[in-house]
Amino acid sequence: MGDFSNPFDLFESLFEGMDGRSRQSWDGAMNGEDEYYSLVLNFKEAVFGVEKEIEIRRLEKCGTCDGSGAKPGTKSSRCNTCGGQGRVATQTRTPLGIFQQSMTCSSCNGTGETRTPCSTCSGDGRVRKTKRISLKVPAGVDSGSRLRVRNEGNSGKRGGSPGDLFVVLEVIPDPVLKREDTNILYSCKVSYIDAILGTTIKVPTVDGMVDLKIPSGTQPGSTLVMAKKGVPLLNKKNMRGDQFVRVQVEIPKKLSSDERKLIEELSELSKGKTAAGMR
Ligand SMILES: [Zn+2]
Ligand SMILES: [Zn+2]
């Protein structure tokens, strides 16, 4: 037997295990289950937010029986299992002795009455229906983000409150712009001449093509920052991340004879410089 420093913990956990997690209350009302919907967004929709109409399937109050679960026009009779009490006594054997407990009657779900079930909903009081929901996806969401729409899940039973709708997002990656949280990573290629002399190139961003200045003397593998060209912060639309552009410098594998001549002249020039420097 285990040694419990605080026996009340054990009592509490026992009772929790029996009834604590149940969504059903004594009067038979049962809260509706949460509903999940998975929504695929393209890259820019996730970056800037989007309004979407989605169609979900969920349990709604049955119109035939108005949610009661009883066939209209029929009368209810007292439940035989619990004698109309809605509860039945059960015994639970535990290491600390036998507990007598009052549980919800499973025959009548605690209502104390049995009725002829409604033929539309088979007595559940709810039927599965399609519902269109307008959804406002905020800017800055990412794959795995969950949007919670309160009370748009499944209806409750016998007066229970409805569950929530959770929309789970999946974002299709962009072929060239890589997202890293609120920043965007991009890789560009410039010729060795442009890296030496400097130039301006066009770079794709989430805002479209934007000019990027490559300063003279840009080193291979260096990263240039395009400030505020990244993803808006979730719920802080005015703040944005940056785009980081990694510069790859291309060295030609073949040279024309003219190019070769010029490079050789450059080489001579730089040898002269080095020699002058060494003197
Ligand atoms: Zn019904
Ligand atoms: Zn009963």
Image: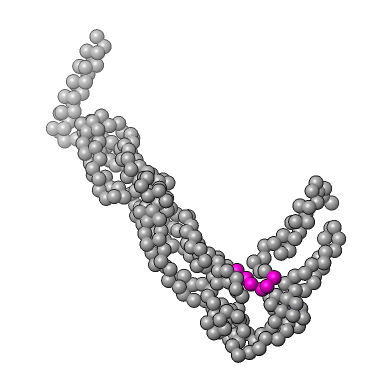
Q: Is residue 35 magenta?
A: no
Observer able to see residue 179: no
* Quarter holding residue 126: bottom right
* Depth order, front residue of 186/251: 186
Height in image: 81 above or below 169?
below
In the picture, measured across the screen, residue 123 lies left or right of residue 112, that is left
Residue pictured at 63% horizontal, 89% vertical: 74
The x and y percentages for residue 177 are 34, 48
Observer able to see residue 271: yes
* Quarter holding residue 20: bottom right
In the picture, measured across the screen, residue 30 lies left or right of residue 129, that is right
The x and y percentages for residue 245 are 32, 40
Residue pictured at 52% horizontal, 82% vertical: 63
Quarter containing the C terminus: top left
Q: Which residues are magenta?
A: 26-31
Q: Residue furthest right?
A: 97
Q: Residue furthest left?
A: 258
* Depth order, front residue of 229/63: 63
